Amino acid sequence: MPALFRRPLFWLVVLITLVVLSIGAFMASKTQQKPVASTAAKALDTPFAAIAAGKVDVDGGVIQVAARTAGVVREVLVQEGDLVKKGDVLARLKDDQLQLSQLGRPVDLRFTATDGTKVDLGEERGKVTAVIFWSAESAPSLVWMGYFAKYADGVLGLRVVTVSVDRNQADLDAAMHSLHLLWPTAFDGQGWQNAIARKYGINTLPTLWLIDRKGNLAFLNARENYQLKINELLLNK
């Protein structure tokens, strides 16, 4: 045996080296596991909602912020540090309950269209009516409207009216021209604050309502399988 192996100091150095390497390997494995645990924690979803009143702290005082009715916030439109003014929309509530309350009831929809046409669904019963809430600034609206227009052109007994939540009429007119839309369209330039859209709690674009021959709201959010739903209403004479 070499003389080096018979020295106690040699084996002490070997032992210390093995201990240091073992500790290093153990710490490295723990470090690699931490991101996995963190990622798993972030991926957890929760079915719970926080219910609370709110306020806005500003330089020189506090501004109370409140909605016209209680509800669940669907979308927050501003971030901390954004400059806002009176009348700006800070957040939108879910209006599903407001829409559901209209189901099966007559729809009081009256307006003067952009082309001057007078629309009053209460006086024009006897046809199945499709009411479309949309915007020329909404890409999903433009795509869906193109498909629906091709379908509706060949359906006898179907009347279509639309409600625009645009702010710029030039953009609306351009979109209608591009899509060859000749339907009566309500427009007041108020965007999401459009009087008809707010009256009926519209919060998604495009939204399709189907009204039966008696003037009652038969289907909410009828975009899916709208052909079958329209055929069902047309057959009910």
Image (spheres, helix red, strand yellow):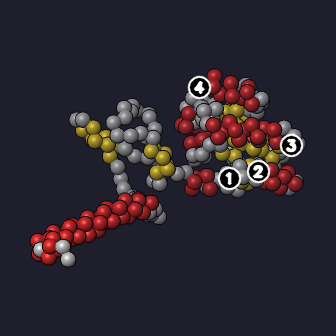
Q: Mark 3 or mark 4, which is nearer the start of the sequence?
A: 3
Say which residue label 4 marks. 168
Q: Mark 2 or mark 3, which is nearer the start of the sequence?
A: 3
Helix, strand or loop at mark 3: loop
Q: Mark 3 or mark 1, which is nearer the start of the sequence?
A: 3
Say which residue label 3 marks. 155
Pointer 2 with pointer 4, Cβ within 8 A: no
Instruction: Give the CA distance from mark 3 to mark 2.
Output: 12 Å
* Viewer-side residue, 124 vs 26: 26
At 75% from the left and 44% from the top, the residue drawn is 130
Q: Mark 4 or mark 2, which is nearer the start of the sequence?
A: 4
Q: Which amino acid does label 3 sit on?
A: Val
At 63% from the left and 22% from the top, the residue drawn is 170
* Viewer-side residue, 22 vs 79: 22
Spot occupied by residue 94 in the image (x, y as percentages of width and height): 52, 51
Helix, strand or loop at mark 1: loop
Spot occupied by residue 159 in the image (x, y as percentages of width and height): 80, 40
Say which residue label 1 marks. 220
Instruction: Give the CA distance from mark 4 to mark 1.
Output: 27 Å
Say which residue label 2 marks. 226
User: Does residue 155 appear in the picture of this structure?
Assistant: yes
Q: Which amino acid does label 4 sit on?
A: Asn
